[in-house]
Image: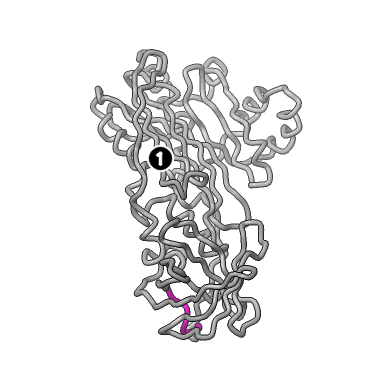
Amino acid sequence: MAALLTLGIVAQPAFAQDEPAWVSVWEGQIGTYPVRACLESFGDGPGRGSYYYLSALEPISISEEDGEGGWVERAPGGDAEATWELAELTSNRVRGTWRQGSRSLPIDLKPVAWTEGEWGGPCSSAAFLGPRTGKGSIASDAAELEGWKYTRKTYRPAKFFAEDVSIETFDFVPQRPGDKAILEVLAADLPRETVEDDFMECLAGSIASLGIDGDYSLSVKPTLVNKAFLVAEQESGSFCGGAHPNYYTIVHTFDRQSGEEVDLFGWIGDERIDGEDSVIPDALRDLVMANWPKDEDASECREYVAEASYWSIGLAGGGLVFRPDLPHVATPCIVPVLVEWSALAPFLDAEGRAGLALLRGG
């Protein structure tokens, strides 16, 4: 259910026809320590890249400083930690000296075959990222929602991802005709331990832009279940190297007879186009705002949210839950608002009334 479209836009390198010959993935040694590196060219700007020791697999940002063979390692905060003094930087070899204070080690790297990854360039390529995959595991824990038993599935990433990656979903014993299809959707959120995993593509974007890992979190939990429907709330946060982090909540409502996701906009009129958030009628928006929380923090957002054009809808036992679709700067104002079924009665169409009957009958 995760989608990289929501993860933000990364400032990508401009790969021109006359890019430097040294743009590539590299492997070799710094001193006696095996390393893998990527070097990229950003148009007319200085070169940038990343590297990691195969013993640690933690990316370290490097950037060209003077255009004459000098590169600098930088900590996540931007402070210089070490320098690369390169005597040779060609299509076939990277050689020089790594220095940190009084300590120095020889650098000797050779090119590795690579193809562009999700974000373009060598730093998001499988050749650079591949050695960092395949080292996580899945933990299973019994859980329960109002007497309904399910299994919490938690991805335990390798230790070098432990502070950057958090992924959790769930599964359950299928009992209804559509449950198998629902389980396939839920399972798709768990990593397959390849560079195509959503979290790897996100971190690749950060490495391509900044030389270091970003962060990625995804949590999918059941919030309502009966014979007719299963509702799962998906919360996600990520930083993939763009202008800002991204956070979002999506409520998925599944039909346990067909296994398909229910478009709740079809309960109040026209269904959405391509599954995106849609416009709700003015009268319904007025009703939502009449139910807006009265606490001080939410009140500060009220005037701003009242002008929101697009909303998402989730299913709850007591009614429908509305969330405004707002710009990143207004993320704190994305507050869930429950409108009870009795108040929604004038807005429900035939599909909505039938759905409510199934909900109450389940």
Q: In the picture provided, is 79 more to the left or to the right than 323?
A: right
Compare residues 263 and 202 and report the one nearer the observer: 202
In-front residue for pair 303/161: 161
- x, y (%) of residue 45? 62, 77
* Left or right position of 292 against 137: right
Tell me, yes or no, if residue 214 can be seen here.
yes
Q: Residues within 10 Å of mark 1 (few under 14, many from 20)?
A: some
Quadrant where the C terminus lies? top left
Q: Residue at x 53, y 69 (%)?
A: 49
Q: Quadrant of residue 25?
A: bottom left
Q: Quadrant of the N terminus?
A: top left
Residue for point 25% across, 26% down:
174
Q: With respect to residue 213, does 331 lie above or below?
A: above
- Residue 152, above or below 190: above
Counting from the top left corner in percent of width and height, residue 203 is at 48, 55
| Residue 158 placement (x, y as % from top left) | 41, 46
Q: Which sits in the foreground, 121 or 75?
A: 75
Number of disc labels: 1
For residue 101, which quarter of the picture? bottom right
Q: Is residue 134 left or right of residue 301?
A: left
- Where does the magenta region start and end? 19-24
Tell me which amino acid carries mark 1. Arg
Tag 1 residue: 156
- Nearest to the observer: residue 306 or residue 184: 184
Residue drawn 43% across and 71% down?
A: 29
**In the displayed structure, would residue 251 be above or below residue 1?**
above
The residue sitting at 64% across, 46% down in the picture is 327
Task: Tell me the element at label 1.
Answer: strand
Q: Main secondary structure of the magenta part?
A: loop
